[in-house]
Image: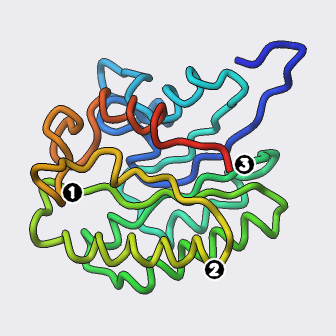
Amino acid sequence: MASVSEPGIVVAALGDSITAGSPGWDPDPVHRSAAPAPESQYEYWAARADPRLDFRNCGIYGQRTDEIADRLDVCADGAEVLVVQGGINDIAQGRSVDDAAANLSQMVCRGRELGLRVTLANVLPWNNGYPRADGEIRRLNGLIDEISRQEDVSVLRFCETLEDEVRPGRMREEWTSDGDHPSVEGYRRLGELAFRLP
């Protein structure tokens, strides 16, 4: 929480289960686990590192980029910063990587149209999808870098922050809870090491 003398920066975090904080947290109380762990969110750790940040968690488990895009205006209302994250569910559901990239680009452009500072997160390694999905994840991350250059927005390096140097294409075991999502330690790394205000 920001102090009275220092106004907070409202950050709209828009994405899928990685933004939501799965499996330990969900912004919707109906979908939270029996033992919810708020520290199972990168937003929790980023706000601890920078108390000015006031996160609005708009993550929904299982959503593709087209579904995430439909929620942008509602999530971003009243925010100053927009974090766009998504793409793994497009890959998991056999959707086009090019379409996912186009949706992410559209969200970046829409955020800027709304006058927001925008940043884009790249896609995490997916242990349970390795090696089948690795090529598509790498291709989508390359397209995310292209969007970053074309639209002059920063990229949060989620993939590089959790990728195992010894086993490329996968998260390090202690940084994933289930092979799909980060562990609390993984989310801590994303919030403290990868997150940067645009």
**Is 51 placed left or right of 61 in the picture?**
right
Residue 81, which numbered label?
3
Comparing labels 3 and 2, the label whose residue is closer to the camera: 2
The residue depicted at 58 percent of the width and 70 percent of the height is 148
Q: Is residue 91 above or below residue 21?
A: below
Q: Earlier in the sequence, mark 3 or mark 2?
A: 3
Rendered location of residue 64, percent (x, y): 42, 67
Crowd band around label 2 with a 10 angstrom C-alpha radius: few (<14), some (14–19), many (20+): few
- Tell which of 44 and 35 is nearer to you: 44
Q: Is residue 123 above or below residue 161?
A: below
Three-letter amino acid code at disc 1? Trp
In the picture, which quadrant includes the N terminus?
top right
Three-letter amino acid code at disc 2? Gln
Element at badge 2?
A: helix
Residue 150, which numbered label?
2
**Is 108 placed left or right of 174 in the picture?**
right
Three-letter amino acid code at disc 3? Val
Residue holding disc 1? 126
